[in-house]
């Protein structure tokens, strides 16, 4: 049970599900949004902005998986593939059909969502490991499709296999080609999608998802149509992934067939575990934590390489990412399965009860 | 016709390897209700360990050390990482075995690097003639191993006390604990047995492709084999492995290699759409 600020009582249901309750919370939200808006002016560092942009893009994707796996309880081990669907769809819409990015963005989200529904159909009859493994099947089938069978040149586009470079996205006279400009493309998208995700899970839809996660048979007996809601969960989760993939295209401006692998899917799942599965701050914490960890590892890798013999140091470089990620996930699963978000709630509670230790 | 037989035989050979990997996964799932994603990684360790030790201490030394090492690794993994997760939701166990896989893969790259290691030579290169058709000896051996292990495990689960205890544990952990079965020990035993199965699969894989850290990928391909047959069925593991291996080999031979890569997963989706618990899996009636 999360603690409330002192003196805040719920009288109506509206109050009970409110996200922002008090004036100080409104003010801090406003200050945070202002901080996001002026971030590139405060820190005009290309390296930092690049990192922040990547983090923002993956937050969208992680929110999608959080809705699908964290709230609706449908484990998906193929999330990166759906990001790939969004990315390829966006690139196809822009090169073959010559649509503008602003139309392709929602369209590619919808495309990814529809593909998600297609692979969500088994979820109506499958559960647990069986379902998780069919999403792995989706991962392999989708990536192999893009690698070997997808021919956008038939539609009059260009071949993606050679690694096509797209033109920068434009809005009026603004060209999104530098990290600062891209930040202003990505940040509003992330804020909007976060807003959407946060509100979705406290709506009728979100409550139905949670009921399905906790016990799907009981949910169906209570009148929640599993058929509709499971497929909706797949659509929404994959829609987020598709949007994230499409923005990733605008960000990287290059599409390579060796992206969006099983490793990436598992990476997003691990991020959710680290951040906190089924909590609204989990994806943000998880992505920031893992990305910062990657950067720290990159920082220390050369120093580590110097200390060790040359033959070993190249091996360390190839395997360090794997080992660190695996190790962190193992630690979180054993020590704090509810993730960083749970720790954050405890910390907030401590501050509210201070100087008392109970609450 | 020879073309067809050739692909059928190589499909059956790779299928038996899948079967043995799948058997390891099924043994773990049957008693602990954990799907071991890292089975392929155990196999990779088995191949590399046997290849390197075998080149120094001879065939017997390599086999013994590889066997003991893989079994001990299985024991260690269960004790250190999966024991604390008892009672946690399913996704925790799934991600744990995936993370273990990453740790093993990273560890293998650190210890062995990215080179290809020559596997010990176990089987004579001379082919046996079946009628007029030459068959490599390791294929026959793989078949013998599959049939023997299948019948042994069938007998084991049906006749011995330990096997019955394992089946009871699969049914309900708490009930079997209160009936006097040491559930924790059952968990350890199933992981050790599964490590042994990974080693046996690694012997045939090593003969096929040598020792390399990418050997773990075979574990991913065994996933369709397990699920097509049914997660908790030993017959299913064997038949699922053979089906997947043969289909993969035939599609690779007659259509394209690219399609052959994914056809196991397409078969998996189709089978699960029709039979959600696999071909031989136990259908459970859920109660709220």
Image: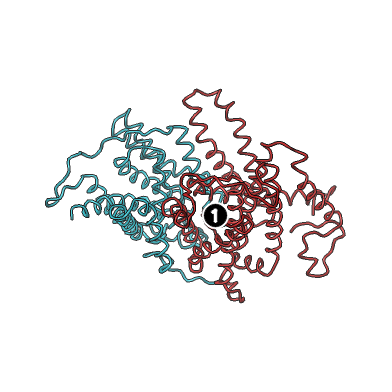
Packing grade of label 1 (10 A; few <14, some 14-19, many >=20) is many
Q: Residue A263: give x, y in percent of width and height.
A: 51, 47
In this rendering, position of residue A295 left or right of residue B24: right
The residue beneath circle 1 is: A79
A1 and A122: which is toward the camera: A122
Which of the image's four quarters has the N terminus of chain A? bottom right
Q: Residue at x 50, y 40 (%)?
A: B103
In this rendering, position of residue A301 left or right of residue B30: right
Q: Is residue A220 above or below residue B14?
A: below
Q: Residue A336: give x, y in percent of width and height.
A: 64, 48
Which of the image's four quarters has the C terminus of chain A? bottom right
Colour displayed for chain B in the image of the structure: cyan
Q: Residue A268: give x, y in percent of width and height.
A: 58, 50
Colour displayed for chain A in the image of the structure: red
A182 and A115: which is toward the camera: A182
In this rendering, position of residue A9 left or right of residue B243: right
């Amino acid at each position: 049970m999360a603690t409330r600020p002192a003196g805040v009582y719920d009288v109506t249901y509206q109050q009970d599900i409110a996200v922002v309750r008090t004036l100080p919370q409104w003010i801090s939200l406003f200050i945070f949004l202002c901080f996001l808006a002026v971030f590139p002016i405060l820190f005009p560092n290309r390296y930092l902005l690049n990192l922040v942009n990547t983090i923002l893009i993956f937050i969208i994707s992680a929110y999608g998986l959080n809705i699908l796996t964290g709230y609706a309880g449908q484990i998906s081990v193929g999330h990166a593939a759906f990001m790939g669907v969004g990315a390829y769809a966006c690139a196809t819409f822009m090169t073959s059909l010559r649509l503008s990015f602003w139309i392709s963005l929602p369209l590619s989200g919808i495309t990814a969502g529809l593909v998600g529904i297609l692979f969500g159909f088994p979820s109506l009859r499958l559960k647990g490991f069986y379902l998780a493994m069919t999403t792995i099947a989706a991962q392999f089938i989708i990536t192999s499709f893009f690698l070997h069978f997808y021919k956008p040149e038939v539609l009059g586009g260009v071949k993606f296999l050679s690694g096509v470079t797209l033109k920068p996205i434009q809005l009026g006279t603004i060209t999104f080609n530098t990290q600062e400009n891209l930040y202003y493309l990505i940040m509003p998208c992330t804020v909007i999608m976060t807003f959407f995700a946060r509100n979705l899970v406290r709506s009728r839809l979100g409550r139905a998802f949670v009921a399905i996660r906790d016990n799907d048979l009981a949910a169906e007996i209570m009148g929640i149509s599993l058929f509709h809601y499971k497929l909706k969960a797949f659509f929404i989760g994959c829609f987020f992934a598709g949007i994230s993939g499409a923005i990733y295209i605008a960000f990287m401006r290059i599409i390579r067939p060796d992206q969006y692998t099983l490793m990436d899917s598992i990476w997003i799942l691990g991020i959710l575990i680290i951040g906190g599965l089924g909590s609204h701050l989990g994806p943000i914490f998880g992505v920031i934590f893992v990305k910062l960890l990657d950067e720290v590892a990159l920082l220390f890798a050369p120093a580590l390489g110097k200390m060790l013999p040359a033959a070993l140091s190249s091996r360390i470089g190839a395997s360090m990412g794997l080992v660190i990620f695996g190790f962190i996930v193992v630690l979180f699963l054993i020590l704090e399965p509810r993730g960083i978000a749970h720790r954050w709630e405890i910390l907030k509670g401590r501050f509210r009860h201070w100087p008392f230790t109970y609450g | 016709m020879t073309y067809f037989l050739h692909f059928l035989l190589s499909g059956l050979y790779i299928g038996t390897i899948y079967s043995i990997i799948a058997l390891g996964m099924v043994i773990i799932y049957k008693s602990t209700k954990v799907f071991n994603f890292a089975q392929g990684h155990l196999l990779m360790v088995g191949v590399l360990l046997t290849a390197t030790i075998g080149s120094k201490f001879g065939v017997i030394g390599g086999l013994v050390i590889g066997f003991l090492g893989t079994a001990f690794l299985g024991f260690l993994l269960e004790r250190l990482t999966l024991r604390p997760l008892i009672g946690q939701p399913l996704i925790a166990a799934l991600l744990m075995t995936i993370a273990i896989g990453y740790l093993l893969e990273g560890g293998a790259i650190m210890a062995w690097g990215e080179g290809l290691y020559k596997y010990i030579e176990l089987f004579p290169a001379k082919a046996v003639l079946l009628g007029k058709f030459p068959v490599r000896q390791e294929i026959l051996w793989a078949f013998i191993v599959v049939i023997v292990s299948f019948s042994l495990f069938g007998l084991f689960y049906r006749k011995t006390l330990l096997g019955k205890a394992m089946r009871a544990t699969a049914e309900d952990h708490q009930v079997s604990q209160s009936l006097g079965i040491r559930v924790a020990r059952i968990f350890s035993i199933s992981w050790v047995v599964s490590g042994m199965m990974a080693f046996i699969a690694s012997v045939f894989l090593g003969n096929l492709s040598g020792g390399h850290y990418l050997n773990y990928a075979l574990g991913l391909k065994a996933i369709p084999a397990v699920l097509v047959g049914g997660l908790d069925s030993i017959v299913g593991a064997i038949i699922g492995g053979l089906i997947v291996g043969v289909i993969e080999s035939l599609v690779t031979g007659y259509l394209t290699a690219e399609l052959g890569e994914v056809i196991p997963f397409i078969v998996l989706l189709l089978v699960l759409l029709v039979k959600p618990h696999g071909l031989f899996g136990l259908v459970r009636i859920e109660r709220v």
